[in-house]
Image: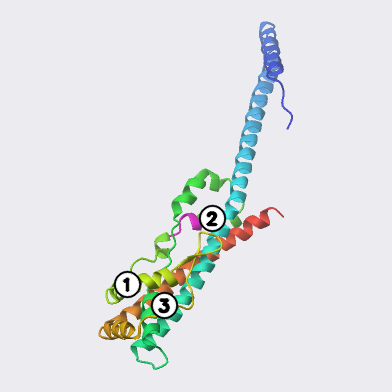
Amino acid sequence: MPTIPAGKLRGGSRMVIRRIREHIVHHNWFAVAVDLAIVIVGVFIGILAANWNQQRAEERETREMLVRLQPELKALDDFSSSARAYYAVTGRYAETAFRGWSRDPGVSDEQFVIAAYQASQIYSFNNNGLSWALAFGANDVRNIRGRGIRDPLTRLMTYDYTTLRFGQTGYRDEVRKHIPDDLQTIIRARCGERIGADEREFELPSTCSINMAPDKAATAAAELRRHPELVELLRQHRATTAAFLTNLGQFDRQQRLLQQRIQAMDH
């Protein structure tokens, strides 16, 4: 939009004021009214133009912020995928542990002890709504035209992130009290979490073998079987895992919808 130099604006204002004075001297009230109307309309148009430019600048800034948000949304999507893969692995270890407590001959003592430990591994979400609130204030959200982007963004900003926290469970606390510390150290060293390709994600090996001495494995397995209450705690642990994945699925739908809407914004 072309702009008028400030000098010309000041000069024009002086000319109008001078004309108004001349009309007043000559009692030409109609001309005075016309000149005043011109001044008022000019000021009004100037204010509208300034507001329009301000709004356009704010909308452009908000749009740029949304575009810059896409890598963060991609990171959230990657976290979701890695969390699902992670808990699929712990779920298989849990099934093996159940079979170990049932004395399934197909599960060795070493496999039982390892599975009981690996089933207690957890992977939690570390983000929160504060980062969204810092990036987007109330005015920024209002500057987003249309509800297609505004609604999912608002839902992510106000999401209850505590539902994506996977903290300590009774099973995790108790089972680790009954596995010798040296065995836990070996399991963590050889079969613990590994950093994924993204360097912000974690993976858990789907299989694990530590060549445990048979007598040591038998002793550790016997100790676990002396505590059948761990079976019930493991069931509760798996229920907590299922609830976490359900909440994660709800969160996924919102962040993926927002990601799709932002991508469509540029087309």
CB atoms of marks 2 and 3 within 8 Å: no
Looking at the rendered structure, the kind of residue marked 3 is Ile
Q: Which of 257 and 198 is in front in this view?
A: 198
Q: Which of 159 and 237 is in front in this view?
A: 237
Q: Name the residue under label 2.
A: 153
Q: Residues within 10 Å of mark 2 (few under 14, many from 20)?
A: many
Left or right for 36, reference 219: right
Looking at the rendered structure, the kind of residue marked 2 is Leu
Mark in the foreground, 2 or 3: 3
Left or right for 152, reference 228: right
Looking at the rendered structure, the kind of residue marked 1 is Asp
Res. 68 in view: yes
Where residue 135 appears, as percent x and y from the top left, is 51, 47
Q: Earlier in the sequence, mark 3 or mark 1?
A: 1
Q: Which residue is drawn at 58% across and 59% down?
A: 74
Disc 1 and disc 2: Cα gap in Å?
A: 47 Å
Q: What residue occupies the far top of the structure in this picture? A: 25
- Tell me the tag on residue 210: 3
Q: What residue occupies the far right of the structure in this picture? A: 2
Vertical order, 107 against 47 (above or below): below
Q: What residue occupies the far left of the structure in this picture? A: 226
Where residue 198 appears, as percent x and y from the top left, is 55, 60
Q: Nearer the viewer, residue 210 or 125?
A: 210
Question: Tag 3's secondary structure?
Answer: loop
Question: Tag 1's secondary structure?
Answer: helix
Q: Which residue is drawn at 42% across and 84% down?
A: 95
Disc 2 and disc 3: Cα gap in Å?
A: 47 Å
Q: What stretch is highlighted in magenta?
A: 155-160
Mark in the foreground, 1 or 2: 1
Q: Mark 1 points at which residue?
A: 182
Vertical order, 119 against 198 (above or below): below
